[in-house]
């Protein structure tokens, strides 16, 4: 490790660092703008000027940019030197010449890097008396607000948007001092990572438009570490709330998961928490019109009475949810027993996830982190549209491509954004994707062979196979596993394999159930034969999990009681006899397992409305009310987590993911708010009840390291303060707890290139068990009926996810319901591009209708029709299905 | 100055008598009592009393909802929620000050970047119910500019609002034509 | 008029005058104190605020008659009564008129001293029965202070008794037809006035109820009518000490032109003015100073005075 001299003091720095990084590593205050830990140095802003001395005899030195000066052995620099300090102050003064007088109305105010740097450099007096440059702003869509006057030309936005994340539609225009950062023409930003501009911009040029509607300063936000619940990746978020509503979601740095970034679905998807159509009171939706007249207590008593009677006769069952926490699912499992518990994952997906989890736990492959993926050199994406399924995986792929030159090969129905930088894209229906995968596997086994993809994979130093669950096709997964198996056989290493799952806890609930419980189909069967008379459903809309809606509705109507715990009004909750409000992720604490098998804890950010409780706690109360209190003797979430640990060894260590109950820092619990939180006494209010966990709403000190509730240190109010909380720049946080990896085949922590095979593990473990014989609907092509197409669903980043689409901003960006067809097929059907039709879709076992705009896409296979997944109109879709299409009428 | 440390024994008596005499003479001096409410103490114009929200010379609300008053308040008695109109002008959706907590320190006025929040000489704010001492925006907003007659924040800020486009503020160049390629 | 009727009339008149004068005195004190402090004092209720005490009395009367749950109820209730009774009782021997007191007692002066000694029990009982730390501290201070200063007071009066040759207050007044005793006995006069102030527990001797240390001292836990009784007792006490000083040192109702009761009232008024004046001027004693002054200054002065007086009286009787 080289030793450098800063201001005469020796500092040991890591190899390959520059002076700015070295200074920040050692928590020295050296101002900067354009440098970013993830995007590196460009030396554009001239702010990190230091005095650089040639050697110990050099008395004059010269000004040099810290970010451009390598910190090699013996480098001697001075930060605290008059000329350098004056230079930095002048840089700020020049920037301030045109910076508008906006701070009071600027959303960046209070967490503005420019404010911090202005104070840090000591520029306090304005000498310039001339006129300021102004710009016109652009409309950049419902997510990002543009205020170009504030720009200081650091180029961070385009460096992130274009260079770092592969966007196209943000650029730098014009010349001399008219330089302009924006789009060629007004319109919504196309990149799914546009929200990161808010955090990357050191001042207020790009701000969060949803936050703007209910703006609060950073110091007023009540924050707690949370986990994004809008896809399976489990990105770490910092949710900010104020006056009982969620105001914004910001990135929470996790060195192993999402780094500095979030996708727009995760960042702007929070609005459903504040939505008007939430379920906030216990209700009896099936009764006519008298919902409000029934008291909450009576709804509860009736539900308990029904459950108590049924629990005695054994006709009680429960459906959990992949979007609910492990604790909520475990509570339900405790209520009904493992055999009567259903995970609530749609059957086709459950098979895939179960297979994946089984193989991963058996050690058939290593599931890499997002950071590890960025280091891969050949990536094969088989049957996944990562942009829309798991956006940050798309970013990781782009980083692998842009930074390491990785070759990305796509085989799938739709290329998504990845297609823009992929080395190859082969389009096909799920059946042909699987066939293609098998061919690659065969090619690998045949030592490369003639298959180009197989040849590249075979030659790769660090190959990775990624698949997704969006086609719900077991054959695609089997083909992917075959490639992985072939790679293992070939290279003798643990191959790397990743699969995106659709929801935040899909993998967790599957591991919890461990294939012991009922499938959703068997639940419906059991209801029909009268084996289940009372069903408890937590945070799940069964209509999103089941194809035949008529049959499902009939079955649910047959139940003596359908008790639904959810935070949204869904089709299922509308059919409930008793519906109880559940807490959303920001309103509760819990544990989630992401698609990488990482157990992570989210903490309650804000107190929900009066009757809203977390599902696990409502279920615990049910268990106690039916006279089995000893089965669920849980006071706090920690007790449930401990019970899970005790009964499910897979989750061992889950209780250590968050500070233990009663944890104190400097004799105070960790505060959700900073000491500058304002307005505590503006109303006369009752005392807040005691906090059940280690976080409190008021008082207390900001944590240093372990849980950066809202990273800020004196002088560093912006999110750049994160450097103060890390051991080294771009490294893990001090006292970091990035989550616990279940599938770590090579132990936790940094994972180098694929390691040699562990001889103790049998490759046979990767073969499917007899329990889950894979089934592929797509494989069976029906007879040559010309009107029959394979209806597939494509995930849409804004729209397919059930919670985030309820927010107005993302709803605006979600495409209208479409039916995508090959031109020939459209011609045969007699439908025209761009027009709306009412369509009848007739399958073998059920039929349905759909209003959709027809879109023609000649990249699609001829025999496929694509609809958006997860929309209200298309939520019946569970797996690729051969259906006859009839366009009934043309909408005007 | 020389400080006396030793006194003659009769000093106690003479001191006492002198004190009695001084106080006796006080009886014939004019009382300083101001007979409120018939008489009123003269209050300086800058006396720190009831807080108001002022309007700019154009009659619009000056407050832009920047939260600086709320954060500087040592007793945390100010709360507000910022919002904006369809033209981008920021204003407080609601604003409340709990005068049962306010200590009239005037920090809010000092912190206010727009001269919106000002303390007035009015001190007659007695109420029978504590909740009546929570003043809402309706109670706080006055129709005049208060102490600063001319200041209008939006004439200086770079943001555009209804009636003021980019480049129309004080000391601003007209908006840059980004398609201009002249050197 | 029978002797009984006359006695009853005298009693009734004295009682009414005292019970009107005491509340008036509250108002007078507040107005006077205000003037000494450049204020106006209560001037709102009635003309010149004269009805202020009526309003205060009404307030006190209509307040809930409450005994704290931690107090010892019987002595708690009895304590203020003792004060009222002893102070009013002492007035029986004060010769307001030329014809003497209500009761022409030969041991009048002793009766006064006895009554004022019994008054200490009121304070002691109040403090102990209140069962609270401030009341207890106040009572202890009051007891120590009153015992200390009673001695000096008694000794200063003893020298007068020596000269007058009688304990009968009327006789003492008659004996001052020529020269009031203040001229012959200036030291006794000063000692009596100071000790009297201390007996009254008024500033600068108000340690038993020092607000800024022990809230309100022995009557901290008292409210409503019982508090009013303490209040009444204090102001009646002022009149009583003034009346005794008038009787013993200023020749009671003796004076030209005006009838005896008027002269008596004027002289008492002067003493009351002096008490209020002292309160407006002098700060409270420190406790050790209080004790030191009582035992090391007042008592020796009174003793010396008594010895000298005794010697002179003996010399004169021997000489005649």
Image (tube, rainbow, N blue to C red):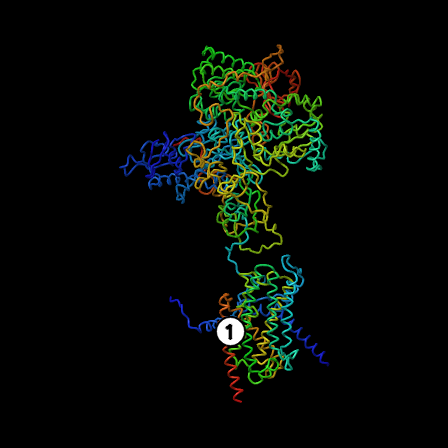
| Residue on which disc 1 sits | C299
Q: Chain of mark 1?
A: C
> Looking at the image, can residue B35 be seen?
yes
**C61 or C114: nearer the viewer:** C114
Q: Quadrant of residue A287?
A: top right
When the figure is inspected, residue A511 is found, relative to residue B58, above or below; the finding is above
When the figure is inspected, residue C233 is found, relative to residue C69, above or below; the finding is below
Q: Is residue A349 left or right of residue C285?
A: right
What SS does tag 1 mark?
Answer: helix
Q: How many marks?
A: 1
Residue A665: percent from the left, percent from the top? Answer: 49, 40
> Looking at the image, can residue A398 be seen?
no
When the figure is inspected, residue A479 is found, relative to residue B31, above or below; the finding is above
**A506 or A145: nearer the viewer:** A506
Residue A240: percent from the left, percent from the top? Answer: 53, 37
Residue at horizontal 52 percent and vertical 79 percent from the top:
C306
When the figure is inspected, residue B44 is found, relative to residue A558, above or below; the finding is below
Q: Quadrant of residue C19?
A: bottom right
Category of crowding for the residue at label 1, using alpha-carbon neighbours closer than 10 angstroms: few (below 14), some (14–19), many (at least 20): many
**Which corner quadrant holds the N terminus of chain C?**
bottom right
**A136 or C293: nearer the viewer:** C293
Residue A161: percent from the left, percent from the top? Answer: 46, 28
Residue B30: percent from the left, percent from the top? Answer: 52, 69
Q: Is residue A425 left or right of residue C28?
A: left
Q: Residue furthest bottom?
A: C320
């Amino acid at each position: 490790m080289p030793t450098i001299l800063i201001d005469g003091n020796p500092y040991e720095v890591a190899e390959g660092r520059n002076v700015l990084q070295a200074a920040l590593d050692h928590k020295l205050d050296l101002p900067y703008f354009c440098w970013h830990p993830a995007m590196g140095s460009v030396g554009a802003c001239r702010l990190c000027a230091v005095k650089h001395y040639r050697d110990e005899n050099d008395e004059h030195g010269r000004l040099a940019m810290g970010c451009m000066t390598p910190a090699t052995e013996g480098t001697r620099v001075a930060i605290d030197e008059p000329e350098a300090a004056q230079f930095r102050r002048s840089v700020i003064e020049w920037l301030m010449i045109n910076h508008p007088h906006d701070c009071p109305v600027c959303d960046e105010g209070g967490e503005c890097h420019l404010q911090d740097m202005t104070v840090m450099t000591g520029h306090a007096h304005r000498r310039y008396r001339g006129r300021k440059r102004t710009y016109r702003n652009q409309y950049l869509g419902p997510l990002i607000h543009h205020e170009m006057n504030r720009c200081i030309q650091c180029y961070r936005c385009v460096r992130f948007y274009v260079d770092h994340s592969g966007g196209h539609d943000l650029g730098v225009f014009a010349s001399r001092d008219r330089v302009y950062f924006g789009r060629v023409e007004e319109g919504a930003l196309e990149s799914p990572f546009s929200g990161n501009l808010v955090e990357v911009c050191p001042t207020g040029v790009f701000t969060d438009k949803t936050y703007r509607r209910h703006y609060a300063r950073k110091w007023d936000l009540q924050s707690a570490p949370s986990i994004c619940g809008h896809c399976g990746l489990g990105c770490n978020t910092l949710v900010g709330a104020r006056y009982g509503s969620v105001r914004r979601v910001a990135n929470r740095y996790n060195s192993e998961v999402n780094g500095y970034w979030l996708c727009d679905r995760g960042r702007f998807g929070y609005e459903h928490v504040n939505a008007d159509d939430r379920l906030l009171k216990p209700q009896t939706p099936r009764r006519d019109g008298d919902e409000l007249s029934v008291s909450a207590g009576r709804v509860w008593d009736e539900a308990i009475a029904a459950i108590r009677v049924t629990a005695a006769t054994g006709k009680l069952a429960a459906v959990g949810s992949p979007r609910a926490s492990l604790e909520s699912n475990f509570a339900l499992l405790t209520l009904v027993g493992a055999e009567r518990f259903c995970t609530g994952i749609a059957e086709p997906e459950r098979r895939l996830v179960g297979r994946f989890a089984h193989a991963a736990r058996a050690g058939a492959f290593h599931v890499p982190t997002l950071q590890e993926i960025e280091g891969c050199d050949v990536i094969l994406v088989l049957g996944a549209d990562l942009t829309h399924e798991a956006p940050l995986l798309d970013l990781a792929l782009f980083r692998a491509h842009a930074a390491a030159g990785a070759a990305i090969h796509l085989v799938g129905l739709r290329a998504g954004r990845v297609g823009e930088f992929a080395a190859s894209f082969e389009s096909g229906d799920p059946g042909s994707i699987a066939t293609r995968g098998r061919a690659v596997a065969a090619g690998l086994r045949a030592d490369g062979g003639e298959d180009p993809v197989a040849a590249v994979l075979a030659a790769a130093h660090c190959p990775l196979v990624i698949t997704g669950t969006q086609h719900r096709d077991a054959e695609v997964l089997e083909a992917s596993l075959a490639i992985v198996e072939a790679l293992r056989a070939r290279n003798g290493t643990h191959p790397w394999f990743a699969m995106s799952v659709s929801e935040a806890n899909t993998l967790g609930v599957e591991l919890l159930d461990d294939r012991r419980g009922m499938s959703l189909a068997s639940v419906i069967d059991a209801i029909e034969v009268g084996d289940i008379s009372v069903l408890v459903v937590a945070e799940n809309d069964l209509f999103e999990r089941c194809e035949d809606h008529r049959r499902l509705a009939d079955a649910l109507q047959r139940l003596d009681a359908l008790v639904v715990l959810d935070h949204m009004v869904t089709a299922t909750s509308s059919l409930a006899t008793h519906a109880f409000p559940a807490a959303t992720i920001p309103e509760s604490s819990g544990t989630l397992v992401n698609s990488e098998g990482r157990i992570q804890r989210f903490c309650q950010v804000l107190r929900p409305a009066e009757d809203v409780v977390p599902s696990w706690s409502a279920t615990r109360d049910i268990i106690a009310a039916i006279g089995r209190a000893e089965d669920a003797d849980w006071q706090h979430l920690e007790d449930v987590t401990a019970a899970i640990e005790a009964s499910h060894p897979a989750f061992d260590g889950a209780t250590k993911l968050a500070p233990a109950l009663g944890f104190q820092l400097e004799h105070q619990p960790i505060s959700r708010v900073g000491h500058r939180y304002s307005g505590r006494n503006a109303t006369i209010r009752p005392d807040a009840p005691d906090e059940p966990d280690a976080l409190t709403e008021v008082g207390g000190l900001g944590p240093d390291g372990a849980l950066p509730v809202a990273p800020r240190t004196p002088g560093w109010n912006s999110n750049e303060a994160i450097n103060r909380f890390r051991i080294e720049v771009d490294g893990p946080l001090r006292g970091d707890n990035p989550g616990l990896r279940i599938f770590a085949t090579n132990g936790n922590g940094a994972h180098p290139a694929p390691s040699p095979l562990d001889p103790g593990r049998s490759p046979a473990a990767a073969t499917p068990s007899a329990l889950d014989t894979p089934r592929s609907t797509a494989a069976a092509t029906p007879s040559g009926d010309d009107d029959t197409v394979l209806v597939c669903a494509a995930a849409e980043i804004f729209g397919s996810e059930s919670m985030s689409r309820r927010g107005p901003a993302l709803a605006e960006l979600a495409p209208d319901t479409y039916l995508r067809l090959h031109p020939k097929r459209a011609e045969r059907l007699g439908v025209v591009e761009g027009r709306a039709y009412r369509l009848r879709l007739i399958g073998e076992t059920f039929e349905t209708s759909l209003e959709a705009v027809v879109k023609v896409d000649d990249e699609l296979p001829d025999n496929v029709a694509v609809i958006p997944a997860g929309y209200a109109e298309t939520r019946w879709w569970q797996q690729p299905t051969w259906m006859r299409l009839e366009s009934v009428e043309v909408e005007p | 100055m020389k400080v006396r440390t030793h006194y003659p024994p009769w000093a106690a008596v003479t001191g006492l008598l002198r004190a009695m005499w001084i106080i006796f003479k006080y009886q014939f001096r004019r009382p300083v009592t101001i007979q409120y409410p018939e008489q009123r103490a003269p209050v300086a114009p800058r006396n720190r009393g009831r807080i108001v929200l002022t309007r700019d010379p154009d009659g619009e609300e000056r407050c832009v909802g920047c939260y600086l008053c709320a954060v500087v308040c040592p007793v945390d008695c100010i709360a507000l929620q910022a919002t904006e109109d369809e033209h981008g002008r920021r204003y407080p959706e609601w604003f409340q000050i709990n005068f049962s907590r306010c200590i009239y320190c005037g920090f809010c006025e000092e912190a206010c970047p727009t001269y919106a929040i000002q303390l007035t000489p009015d001190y007659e704010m007695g109420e029978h119910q504590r909740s009546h001492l929570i003043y809402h925006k309706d109670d706080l907003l006055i129709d005049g500019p208060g102490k600063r007659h001319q200041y209008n924040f939006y004439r200086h800020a770079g943001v555009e609002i209804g009636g003021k486009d980019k480049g129309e503020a004080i000391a601003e160049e007209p908006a840059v034509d980004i398609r201009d390629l002249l050197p | 008029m029978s002797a009984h009727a006359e006695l009853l009339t005298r009693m009734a008149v004295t009682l009414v005058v005292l019970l009107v004068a005491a509340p008036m005195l509250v108002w007078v004190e507040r107005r006077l104190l205000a003037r000494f402090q450049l204020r106006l004092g209560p001037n709102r209720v009635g003309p010149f605020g004269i009805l202020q005490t009526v309003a205060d009395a009404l307030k006190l009367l209509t307040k809930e008659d409450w005994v704290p749950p931690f107090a010892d109820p019987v002595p708690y209730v009895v304590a203020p009564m003792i004060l009222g009774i002893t102070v009013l009782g002492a007035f029986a021997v004060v010769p307001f008129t030329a014809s003497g007191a209500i009761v022409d007692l030969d041991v009048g002066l002793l009766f006064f001293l006895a009554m004022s000694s019994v008054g200490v029990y009121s304070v002691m009982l109040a403090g102990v029965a209140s069962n609270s730390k401030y009341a207890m501290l106040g009572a202890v201070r009051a007891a120590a202070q009153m015992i200390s200063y009673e001695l000096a007071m008694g000794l200063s009066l003893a020298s007068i008794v020596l000269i007058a040759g009688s304990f009968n207050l009327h006789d003492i007044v008659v004996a001052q037809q020529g020269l009031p005793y203040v001229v012959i006995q200036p030291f006794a006069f000063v000692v009596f006035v100071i000790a009297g102030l201390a007996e009254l527990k008024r500033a600068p001797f108000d340690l038993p109820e020092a607000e800024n240390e022990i809230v309100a001292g022995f009557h901290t836990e008292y409210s409503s009518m019982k508090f009013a009784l303490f209040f009444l007792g204090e102001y009646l006490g002022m009149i009583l000490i003034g009346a005794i000083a008038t009787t013993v040192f200023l020749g009671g109702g003796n004076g030209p032109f005006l009838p005896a009761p008027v002269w008596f009232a004027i002289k008492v008024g002067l003493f009351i003015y002096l008490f209020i004046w002292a309160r407006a001027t002098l700060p409270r004693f420190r406790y050790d100073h209080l004790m030191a002054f009582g035992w090391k200054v007042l008592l020796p002065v009174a003793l010396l005075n008594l010895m000298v007086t005794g010697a002179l009286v003996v010399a004169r009787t021997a000489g005649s």
